[in-house]
Image (cartoon, rainbow, N blue to C red):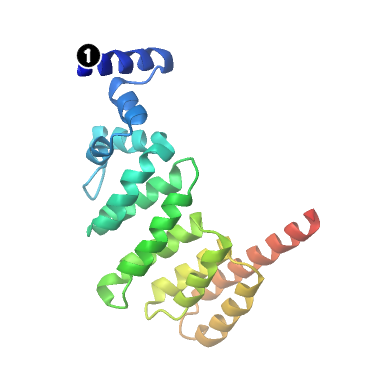
């Protein structure tokens, strides 16, 4: 009897919203298991069904965040981590919960070993796209990371969210590494220009 009423409810919601039954059920019931079943697991989403599932989770927005945050911290699969972070970035909604999970991920999965380099890069990139000014402190620390890729991506992310204090840190990094990593100079210059321009814009709006 309970299943009968659930089916009726989902059918009614589908009629009113135009959503598919599977999508409506996942969205209204916040079925975590269903969300994780929809999450593509392969390296490439070559299958059309996987691509549709991925877009479906993005459209769920905040309703999918609890299940995805739990999976983000539970999985050891870097591909899944990257996919979940991409969903967080592309989806709409309050990003407080995803950001909390990303910060937790940074503290438990980003060790100094070479095996963790990709994870550190992924986290730094996500913070650049989603982070808040308070996340600049973590990015400042990554300027001393043993990986050049982490350092360069940290500069890029600081350009996206960093404040005035980030300019001097980036400039110091350039002075120290300009001969070793000349290709990073342009990236650092872009970051500093972006931060400076944003600061001017914010000052003019006050």
The number of discs equals 1
Q: Position of residue 190 (x, y in %)?
A: 60, 66
Q: Quadrant of the N terminus?
A: top left
Q: Quadrant of the C terminus?
A: bottom right
**Residue 82, image quadrant:** bottom left
Query: Where is mark 1, residue-wise?
Result: 4
Q: Is residue 5 above or below residue 140?
A: above
Q: Position of residue 20 (x, y in %)?
A: 32, 21
Q: Residue at x 36, y 36 (%)?
A: 55
Relative side of 127 to 19, left or right: right
Q: Position of residue 89 (x, y in %)?
A: 44, 48
Q: Secondary structure at mark 1?
A: helix
Q: Residue at x 44, y 61 (%)?
A: 125
**Residue 101, image quadrant:** bottom left
Q: Position of residue 63 (x, y in %)?
A: 39, 37
Nearer-the-camera pick, 152 or 27 = 27
Q: Residue at x 63, y 79 (%)?
A: 168
Q: Residue furthest front?
A: 1
Nearer-the-camera pick, 139 or 42 = 139
Relative side of 27 to 153, left or right: left
Q: Is residue 25 above or below residue 156?
A: above
Nearer-the-camera pick, 175 or 61 = 61
Nearer-the-camera pick, 147 or 19 = 19
Q: Is residue 75 above or below residue 190?
A: above
Relative side of 158 to 28, left or right: right
Q: Residue at x 24, y 32 (%)?
A: 49
Relative side of 66 to 173, left or right: left
**Residue 53, image quadrant:** top left
Dot 1 crowding, Cα within 10 Å, few <14, some 14–19, many 20+: few
């Amino acid at each position: 009897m309970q299943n009968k009423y659930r089916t009726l409810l989902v059918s009614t919601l589908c009629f009113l919203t135009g959503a598919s039954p599977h999508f409506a059920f996942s969205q209204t019931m916040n079925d975590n298991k269903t969300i994780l079943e929809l999450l593509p697991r392969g390296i490439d989403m070559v299958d059309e069904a996987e691509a549709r599932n991925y877009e479906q989770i993005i459209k769920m927005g905040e309703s999918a965040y609890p299940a995805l945050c739990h999976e983000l911290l539970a999985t050891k699969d870097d591909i899944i981590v990257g996919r979940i972070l991409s969903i967080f970035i592309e989806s709409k909604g309050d990003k407080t919960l995803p950001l909390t999970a990303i910060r937790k991920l940074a503290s438990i999965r980003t060790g100094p070993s070479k095996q963790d380099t990709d994870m550190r890069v992924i986290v730094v990139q996500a913070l650049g796209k989603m982070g808040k000014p308070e996340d600049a402190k973590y990015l400042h620390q990554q300027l001393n990371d043993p990986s050049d890729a982490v350092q360069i991506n940290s500069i890029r992310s600081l350009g996206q969210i960093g404040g005035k204090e980030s300019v001097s840190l980036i400039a110091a990094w350039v002075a120290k590494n300009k001969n070793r990593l000349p290709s990073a100079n342009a990236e650092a210059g872009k970051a500093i220009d972006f931060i400076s321009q944003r600061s001017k814009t914010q000052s003019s709006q006050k």
